[in-house]
Structures are given as structure tokens and as C-alpha cells.
Amino acid sequence: MGGTTEASALASALAERGERAVLSYAGRTGQPRAQPVPVRVGGFGGVAGLVDYLRGEGVTHLVDATHPFAATMSGHAVAAAREAGIAHIMLTRPPWVAGEGDRWTHVPDISAAVDALGGKAKRIMLALGRMHVDRFGAQPQHHYLLRFVDAPDQAPALPRHSLIVDRGPFTVDGDMGLMREHGIELIVSKNAGGDGAEAKLTAARRLGLSVLMIDRPPCPAARVTHEVGEVLDWLRHSAERGV
Ligand code: 3Y8
Ligand code: NAP
């Protein structure tokens, strides 16, 4: 189950070893990154649909390498692997932790982030992608800098906004330039972890800007790793044990 830098790294490692693997995308973006293994795109149709897919394709190992905020998919993966009786592991990245010079305020979820933006108008970089943007219409007083992977069909429902269409991974210089150009005062970010979107946090630190950090949802998986190498070991050992 893909959609992250770690999933792409695992796909490359599996291809190098000649392992039979399929990488699955939800189909949220127009041109997902090409992969060195076969790709399937689109939802499965809930847990039952995923169980049918796993059984129909004779899948023996399910690796959930989706984004830490893809909580519904991760919950379905745990349930479907159990029902189909196949091995399951989650490959994710540790959350970011504030360091020296960071000015972070933590909120538990998107709703709390929206509520935290009451008060006078600011220039805010909303680095959350497209799916939750309209929620911030509850705080229309701000000017929002938005960054989407694909150009939207219609303009976002925020009265004051600028839109950048760009996919990561991003760079510190690029994000510092963007924040300066748009006079950004505050960055809103999911605690995605990983290095594909960390540049904005480093840029904020260097510019002395505050960050509203949205904590990730609970992780449903029993077996979790942060390392591609551990997934490869797990695949090898469980194949040897024939489980
Ligand atoms: C479709 C696959 C790879 C994976 C690259 C990572 C890094 C670049 C940074 C900012 C934050 C954000 C967003 C982000 C990043 C990586 C990784 C990551 C954040 C692609 C991809 C898919 C998606 C879906 C997309 C979401 C959106 C979220 C943009 C491909 C490029 C904000 C998450 O338009 C939409 O509907 C987009 C939706 C889910 C969140 C949202 O609410 O909008 N990712 N991103 C996957 C699928 O269809 O299954 O197109 O190649 C993957 C990547 N995005 O292989 O190199 O590993 O995290 N993705 C966040 O972290 O907050 C951008 O702007 O600073
Ligand atoms: P989600 O809310 O957890 O899942 C919603 C539904 O989308 C799932 O029930 C499933 O549909 C389908 N789905 C999700 N991921 C899928 C996958 N990899 N392959 C096939 N179907 C998938 O998921 P999301 O947050 O929208 O994330 C969608 C994709 O974007 C994932 O690949 C994720 O890794 C990637 N991504 C998400 C974020 C983020 O901020 N959420 C950031 C970066 C990348 P059915 O119920 O029909 O099976």
C-alpha cells in the first residue's frame, strides 16, 4: 500500500531482489510516480473488497506503507490481513519532534487546527494539500498559501488565497523562498514525519516562524517498522517459516 517516499524505496528494493510485488495507489493524483513494480490504482471497496483482492491475487504479505494520516486505509489493512489470514506489517516514519529554535504549537487534529486560527488576519502557509482545505473557510480572515499536487478543478473556497501546484519532496531553500515571497507568518503542517516534507519545518525555524503542528491519528497496526531493511528481513524470515 503506497503513496509515500518509504513505499517507493521499498518498491525499488523489492524490484532489485526480483520479488513479486504490486504497489497500490488510491488514485488521488493525476500522475503518480512511476514505480519499478506493477501498480494498481483505486480503492478496493472497503475491508471486504481488500480481502477479495488479497485472496484473488494470492497475496501472502501485506505491507502498509501508506501515509501516517491515511488512517482509514491502515485500519482496513489490519482488518483485511487478519480476515484473509496473511502476514501484515506497517512501514511508516517516526513523527517529527521539535528541536532547538522550533516554535511549534501542537493540536490533535484538523478541527483543532481550524479552531486555533481564531483572531486577527495573518498570512498562513496551509501545507496540508487539497483534501481538507475547505475546513479552513471557517477562518476566512486569513490569507492562505496553498500547495496542491495537482491543479484543482475549481478554485478553493477560501476568499483570500494563493495556490502553488507542486509535488514534493521539497527543499529548504525552495520553501524559505516561498515563505519570504508570500510574507508567511505561520505554517500549518501535519506531523507526517519523513524527509519528503520536512523542508518547510527547517525553513520555518531559520525564518523564526511559528508552526501549528497537527498530531497524527492513532496507529492501528500491531507490527510497525521505520526501516525498509526490516521489512525485507520480515519478508525473508516469514517466507522461511512458511507463514
Ligand atoms: C497519491 C503519489 C513518492 C512519495 C512522495 C511523503 C512525501 C512528497 C510531502 C507540503 C506537504 C501532503 C500531500 C505530501 C507529501 C511526499 C510523497 C508526500 C504533503 C503523493 C502521491 C499521492 C499523494 C496524495 C496526497 C494527498 C495530500 C498529501 C500533498 C504520487 C505525491 C499535503 C501530505 O490532491 C489530492 O487529493 C492530494 C491528496 C493525500 C493530502 C491532502 O489532504 O491533500 N498526499 N501524494 C497517493 C495515492 O493515490 O494513493 O502522485 O506520486 C505522494 C507524496 N506526497 O513516492 O515520492 O512521503 O510524505 N503529500 C502531508 O504530509 O501533509 C505535502 O506541501 O509541504
Ligand atoms: P484514507 O483516508 O486512509 O483512505 C480512504 C480510502 O481511500 C480507503 O478506504 C481506500 O478505499 C482508499 N485508499 C487509500 N489509500 C489507498 C491505497 N494506497 N491503495 C488503494 N486504495 C487506497 O487515505 P488518504 O489519506 O486519502 O490517502 C490516500 C493515499 O494518499 C494513500 O496512498 C496515502 O499513502 C497517500 N498520502 C496521503 C497523505 C495524507 O495526508 N492523508 C499524505 C501523503 C500521501 P476503499 O475503502 O475503497 O478500499
Image (cartoon, rainbow, N blue to C red):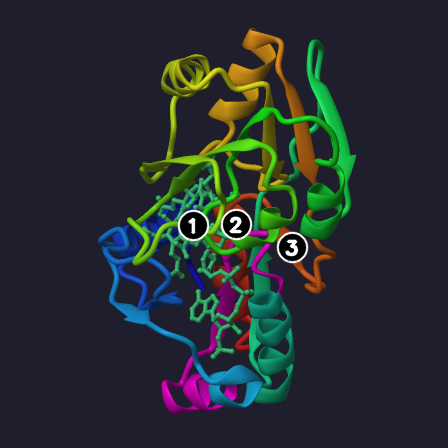
The quadrant where residue 171 appears:
top left
Q: How many marks?
A: 3
Residue under the image location 66 percent in, 38 percent down: 95
**Tag in front: 2 or 3:** 2
Q: How crowded is mark 1: few (under 14 residues within 10 Å), some or many (20 or more)?
A: some
Q: What residue type is labelled 3?
A: Val
Cβ(mark 1) to ligand 1 < 8 Å? no
Instruction: Decide whether residue 203 is among the magenta residues.
Output: no
| Looking at the image, residue 162 lies above or below residue 27 | above
Q: Earlier in the sequence, mark 2 or mark 1?
A: 2
Residue placed under numbered mark 1 in the picture = 156
Residue placed under numbered mark 2 in the picture = 133
Q: SS class of the residue under badge 3? A: strand
Cα distance between the residues tagged 2 and 1: 7 Å
Whether the residues at callouts 2 and 1 have beta carbons within 8 Å, the answer is yes
Residue 9 location in percent, x, y?
A: 38, 45
**Tag in front: 2 or 1:** 1
Residue under the image location 58 percent in, 27 percent down: 187
Depth check: 13 or 6 in front?
Answer: 6
Q: Earlier in the sequence, mark 1 or mark 3?
A: 1
Which residues are drawn in magenta? 51-71
Q: SS class of the residue under badge 1? A: loop
Residue placed under numbered mark 3 in the picture = 224
Depth check: 216 or 81 in front?
Answer: 216
